[in-house]
Amino acid sequence: MQEAISLIKAEHRSLAAVLHGLVTIMGDLQQSGGRTDFSLLGAMLDYVDQYPDRFHHPKEGQFLFRLLRARAPDAAGLLDTLETEHMKNRQLMGELRQALRRYQEQPSDRGRRDAWAELVRQYAEFHWNHMRLEEEQVFPLAESRLRPEDWAQIAAAFRQNEDPLTGLSAKLHYEELLRRIVTAAPAPVGVGAPWR
Ligand SMILES: [Fe+2]
Ligand SMILES: [Fe+2]
């Protein structure tokens, strides 16, 4: 049980760090009016798009939520809300990609920059609330209702790092993407040069 929960929390922390980085970078950029590194923003958006949708949410849905539904029928409403949010994540990502494209077409247009920055803030808020709901409500319920054999299945799923589509190590792919983000992002998010 401890191992499964700590694996899920570690995935939440990675995602929260990149979300926080995006919000911080856009806030700084709005204040400084510096030049935008669109390849970095694109890499960060790829991370917050693919990491939850392809790597994290499927394991929650197919293991943690499925097993909890079986052991705790009273959790159905809460789990329905969270699964709806997993789907909403995809829709919000479409809006974010479109706003970033518009901003990249005309980087000097402050309206487009601010529209993208506002969507980033709303998306980060949405995802932070989603993870908080899981950690504050689902985890305690799971700890009281799931059985040792359930936890073994969940831990095995979260230990399994291959992308089911490609068979490649998804974890390595995301770690490499995260390393590129930290290398390129300006302080305090990463160790890259400041944007001017
Ligand atoms: Fe989730
Ligand atoms: Fe989650």
Image (cartoon, helix red, strand yellow):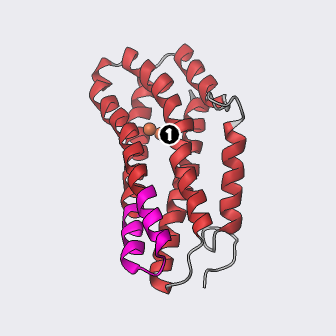
On screen, residue 96 versus residue 13, left or right, reads left
Position of 40 relative to 157 (above/below): below
Tell me the amino acid under the disc marked 1: Asp
- The residue carrying mark 1 is 53
The image position of residue 67, as x and y in percent, is: 45, 18
The picture quadrant for ligand 1 comes to top left
* Label 1 near ligand 1 (CB < 8 Å): no
On screen, residue 14 versus residue 83, left or right, reads right
Tell me where the magenta segment starts and ends, as one range: 97-120
The image position of residue 68, as x and y in percent, is: 41, 21
Tell whether position 108 is magenta. Answer: yes
Q: Secondary structure at mark 1?
A: helix
Tell whether position 123 is magenta. Answer: no
Residue found 37% across the figure and 62% down from its top:
119
Residue found 57% across the figure and 37% down from its top:
55
Residue farthest along the front direction in this orientation = 105
Most prominent secondary structure in the magenta stretch?
helix
Quadrant assignment for the C terminus: bottom right
The image position of residue 137, as x and y in percent, is: 37, 37
Residue found 46% across the figure and 19% down from its top:
146
